[in-house]
Image: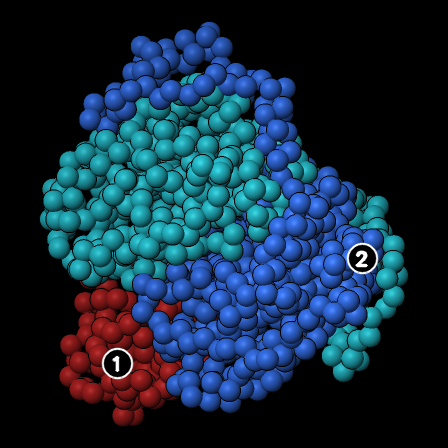
Amino acid sequence: MRFLPHTEADIDAMLAAVGCKDLAALFDDIPADCRPAQPLHLPPGLSEWALNRHMENLAAETATGPGYDIFLGAGSYDHYIPETVQQLLRRGELATAYTPYQPEVSQGTLQAIYEYQTLTARLLGMEAANASVYDGASALAEALLMAVRITKRRLVAISRAIHPHYRHVVATYLRPTGLDIIELPYGPDGRTDLNPLDDAREPAAVAVQSPNFFGCIEDLAAAAEAAHGDPATLLVAAFTEPLAFGLYPSPGALGADIVCGEGQSLGIARSFGGPGLGMFACRNAHLRAMPGRLVGKTVDADGRRGFVLTLATREQHIRRERATSNICTNQGLCATAAAMYMASLGGTGIRALARLNYDKAGYLQTALRNAGVALPFSAPVFNEFVMQLPPGSEAVYRRLLERRIVAGLPLAPFYPELADHYLLCVTETTDKAALDRLVAEVSS
Amino acid sequence: MKDIEELQFPDDVRYSKDHEWARPEGDLFVVGISDYAQDQLGDIVFVELPETGRELQQNEEFGSVESVKAVSELFAPLAGTVMEVNGALDDAPEKVNQEPYSDGWMMKIKPADKADFEALMDRDAYLAMLKG
Amino acid sequence: MNDKVRKPSAEPLLWEMGARGRLAFSLPERDVPEHPLDPALAGEGPDFPDLSEPEIVRHYTRLSQWNMAVDTTMYPLGSCTMKYNPKTNDRQAALPGIAGAHPLLPPPLSQGLLRLMFELEQFLAAITGLPAVTLQPAAGAQGELTGMLIFHAYHGDQGRRRTKILIPDTAHGTNPASATLCGFTAVAVPSGPDGILEPEAVARRMDADTAGIMVTNPNTLGLFESHIREVADIVHAKGGLVYADGANMNAVMGQVDMGAMGVDVLHLNLHKTFSTPHGGGGPGAGPVCVSAALAPYLPVPRVVLTADGFTWSDDFPRTIGRLHAFYGNFGILVRAYSYILSLGADLTRISPLAVLNANYIRAGLRNHYHLPYDRPCMHECVFSDKHQQAHKVTALDIAKRLIDFGFHPPTIYFPLVVPGALMIEPTETETKETLDRFIAAMQAIAAEAVEDPERLRQAPLHAHRRRLDEVQAARKPCLTG
């Protein structure tokens, strides 16, 4: 087997050095009652060629562009990933290193993460960002637990316009803690209705997502004002589409205290939903309550600039049961990809790309409306929005599938009151012809 | 780390088994950690102190000190109310390393029972414990 | 010429390079008109530097050259299983039908991917002896959390809230942290004089308020917990459950049956045992395998096979819920699946060779370094700096000096039960020649500790950076530029 270098002669020489008669004797400490009743049976290994064929066959069953027009977003976005990002990320020196515990031989990873933290803080309008957590959903759960630690309160308020899967993850993380969750409904314009906050008793956090699950831009300034009506309450701003901050103001600029979300849009393949990137940022005042790894700048013994993991005393390997989180491994390579992508776009590029996403979604909105399709929510959007088809729309959806068009995400499974509602997403990768085809099909 | 002979143990304070010290100051007691404790911890990078007004039981945890790779809890050598904490340690935690019995003090406490202080170890008893 | 000028200079930070108006991105052609935007809603956009493509490529290529990695050298970081990461796995994960797959595609349009997950679950079940599997946890620590959520839900269904959990003093720090998230108080169980758990120590602590035990087997001393079956019986007799941290599965694949051992829940680290690249700290994947009795608690959605093919199901009323926005780190699952298919039946050769390599190092160094538990080890061996301390040389100094010999240091100061620990895990993919060079380097360092200890305290002398000031970094955190 080509990954295993040992020759028979190597094995014999090593067994002699170790003082074992054969390989089986290495496992003499394992009692009989721990051993498998039957030897592990696996099929013979595949050659590299055969493996390629097998994997290509599996992959070929997936619907992807260009054969399909897929108008799906909902937390996973089709943005073009520059070849440079894809190739640089494959460098073994980056991909096959581990957590930079030994900074003298990990400056590449450390500087890359420091740059990621910086660009993330700038994108989100915050003072500090960590080296990433697993994904947007667990980032939100961690943010709420962080707010509970800071405020020592037992209640969190969560917008119902946050991604339903994220809310499910939050409920899962919080269930054993006994913390209370109240849900804020969405209003007729598709944005969160903040009024129920007036009756909430001392929430640790108010969490909203912008753009929200319906693609609507929330009024974060109003949410901050409502949350901060109680000075201890923290506003947690979540997101699934960070590219929006190339066009709209950052959550930090609008008053958020903790900003967290999914960074897949920033140069990371959709890969059937993972690995993605949990982006996480806060204000300096709350730094020591933040979960996850942090890279800081320092100097070496000769006074030269260098980078190290820092503030590690918050983490599980030191504080154990009193850590800010149990997180250990994060999404280091995905964070590096996001930094490469943000740097490739630059300030000029991200504005242009964000505007193009907005314009394409706007074009499709206008065309659908002109064709008589209802767009129920009036709030401004970025690159996603909801369309409402006449009752019985399942047949239309199926017909479009047969024509290789995935006409968005049906919302009824997530919001029973939204039968015949579909969440559509348009990015820079969708050309005008595909948009026109969709309009023609749904209105025919 | 230094040998015990190289460390300072003033005799105007009393010591707890957890290596905190207390010194009377008017109606209050000043509390910090001993030279031995700071030496064991190494370079201190952060000190977490309680809010003023908090009521502490004797031996209750009142905060923590952090070095780069360790966290140690602080335990109140005597019961009472926290009247003041040393805010200067926020920006200069190294004072605990440099001057553990003066600038590196941590809090001032109004004792619930001054007898708690008498029950702490004097210099000789503390040294005997360290040399155990 | 000033000496400092000649040393490699710092690589500029991204924002110390570039010029406004440069672009390293190929913007698509605009084929739609501008859509009106309320100027009151628009933001300023982030303060990013503008760079060209050559600047980006050179920057990251240079940065990469300052890393040690599995692809450049032996990386014997104990407990992390830094084995070779086959390149073919990355190729499979990058296939357009995999990397380009949207997670919310209707199942008929993603059958191959669902099949892959279904088959990977079956492989992991066969390898562990535990019949039901979730692939959702994004890392080992999230797998532990999943396990603890299952413990919590199971005991809730038994009508008894349990508040404590037993954790041996050799455990990974993630164990107590994960248990705490589920409201369990960690109760430490000291290991016995031979470095393994003693059933009596567990029996004394196990009671009806204790949810169960979290065991790492082989443990972090690299020793097999040979009383595990008895420990499991004690825990089960009091209504508790047994959690196994499978971080060290690379030692025992094909050698043990976790179900037979009495394990109820186990997490695997695909980035360790199943060779997916560590990525400078993730992404990993932490699938959880459970007994049939606990299968109803696994996270949703689950892949199920129906007459119409594979599909997703949420219909598991006792599920703990959901841990990930979608299905976990799918790209990592693809690599592990590809690894298992590449090895096939040869998978059972991994553990014997990993254990052989570790014991070969143990034999080569036992006369040079203190071996706190002097008995045959599994996939890793734990030495300490006890002999070198006489010369005021620490585990840290030894680790840093190893860099000068061209090796990544082992894990140091862990497990906590061994003061000054040096935890060495070579993995099965290192050749005998490399191990011989490593042993020779460690022997040379042991000699240097006696003859020239100051050299060790100054090490590394030949790395991109000398020792870094971690105290300054922590006292005055500078996390962004």
On screen, residue C193 above or below A152? above
Left/right of residue C395 with respect to residue A337 in the rendered view:
left
Which quadrant holds residue A408?
Answer: bottom right
Q: Colour of chain C?
A: cyan
Display colour for chain B: red
Whether labels 1 and 2 share one chain: no
Q: Position of residue A129 (x, y in %)?
A: 59, 64
For the point 53% across and 23% down, which residue is it?
C342
Between marks 1 and 2, how big is the CA–CA gap? 71 Å
Secondary structure at badge 1 equals strand
**Amino acid identity at mark 1:** Leu
Of tags 1 and 2, which is closer to the observer? 2
Q: Nearer the viewer, residue C348 or C155?
A: C155
Residue drawn at x 27%, y 24% is A36
Task: Spot the blue chain and give its letter.
Answer: A
Question: Mark 2: which secondary structure?
Answer: helix
Specify the label residue A436 is tagged with: 2
Q: Residue furthest bottom?
A: B27
Locate residue C462: give its quadrant. top right
Q: Position of residue A81 (x, y in %)?
A: 73, 48
Q: Is residue A267 visible?
A: no
Tell me how the rendering is colored.
Answer: by chain
Q: Is residue C89 left or right of residue B110?
A: right
Q: In this orientation, which residue lies closer to the viewer: C311 or C369?
A: C311
Q: Residue at x 33, y 11 (%)?
A: A22
Is there any visible trace of residue A423 in the rendered image?
yes
Residue C82 image offset from top left, x and y in percent? 50, 34
- The answer for which chain carries disc 2 is A
The numbered dot on residue B56 is 1
